[in-house]
Amino acid sequence: MKYIIGNWKMNKTAGEIVEFTRGLKKYKFPKNSNVIFGLAVPYVYLLGMSKLQGHFLIGAQNVSSHENGAYTGEISAEMLADVGLDFCIVGHSERRHLFNESNADVNNKLKRLQEYDMLPILCIGETLEEFEANKTKSVLSEQIKSALDGLDLKKEMIIAYEPVWAIGTGKSASAEIIKDTTAFIKDELNALKVDYPILYGGSVNPANASEILHIENVDGALIGGASLDSDKFVQIGSCLY
Ligand code: PGA
């Protein structure tokens, strides 16, 4: 199974979502294909995505680390499950770096999602500074261990490897780096006796998708910029069928 997951981040208006959905209509999605498409949509539009749900997985980009109560502006895992979402992204690098989310916050968010059996897409990745200092593996190992601490590892999860230096830069990591790093992640997961799908994210586009998606241990892609355009988004997945 391969996952093609778009992350719209803080983009799109209702009108632009209608355009996007219209843009999908010209494509035939193969039945029984082993490719699953999904979209992580801003909260306010989630309920309006129900028409696409069933064909696409629909998910949120973030969840509160708290259960519920006096946390103005937060959205709980219970709420996400209540409106029937399929998944939720946790620990995206923008959350970690722009909103100071710690590994402990990420762990708490995963616990909240597990309480409602919601599929998490856990993002991990090193900064440019860490990459240049050869710290990628130790950073990823720490991110994985702290995120999974105390969780029920038998429940489903997807891991997205997103080098921070490749996100939104137009420069994806090389196939060699992706191959080496995802193999390392796979080993780390195997040591914990789990075998979660591993996605790559960071400047995936229709031109580089085929090479990236055919790398051993890459089970799909998490796509930011290119997922805003229905043609580019579908083209990325169509190299698999
Ligand atoms: P990008 O974003 O595809 O625009 O690099 C990826 C992501 O942030 O998930």
Image: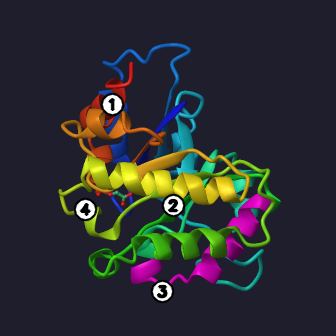
Inter-mark Cα distance, 4 to 3: 19 Å
Tell me the residue at 48%/42% (across/down): 217
Q: Position of residue 36 (x, y in %)?
A: 51, 31
Q: Which residue carries the number 4 mark?
A: 168
- Residue 60 visible in image: no
Q: Position of residue 239 (x, y in %)?
A: 31, 25
- Residue 188 included in the magenta stretch of the image: no
Within 10 Å of the Cα at label 2, are there few (<14), some (14-19), or many (20+) other Cα atoms? many
Magenta residues, start to end: 96-114
* Image quadrant, ligand 1: bottom left
- On residue 234, the disc is 1
Tell me the residue at 57%/76% (across/down): 142
Residue 44, relative to residue 176: is it above or below? below
Q: Which quadrant of the figure contains the N terminus?
A: top right
Q: Which residue carries the number 3 mark?
A: 100
Q: Amino acid type of disc 4? A: Gly
Inter-mark Cα distance, 3 to 2: 16 Å
- Residue 50 visible in image: yes
- Which type of secondary structure does the marked residue at label 4 adopt? loop
Q: Say which of marks 4 and 2 sits in front.
A: 4
Tell me the quarter of the picture where residue 220 sits: top left
Q: Position of residue 110 (x, y in %)?
A: 69, 66
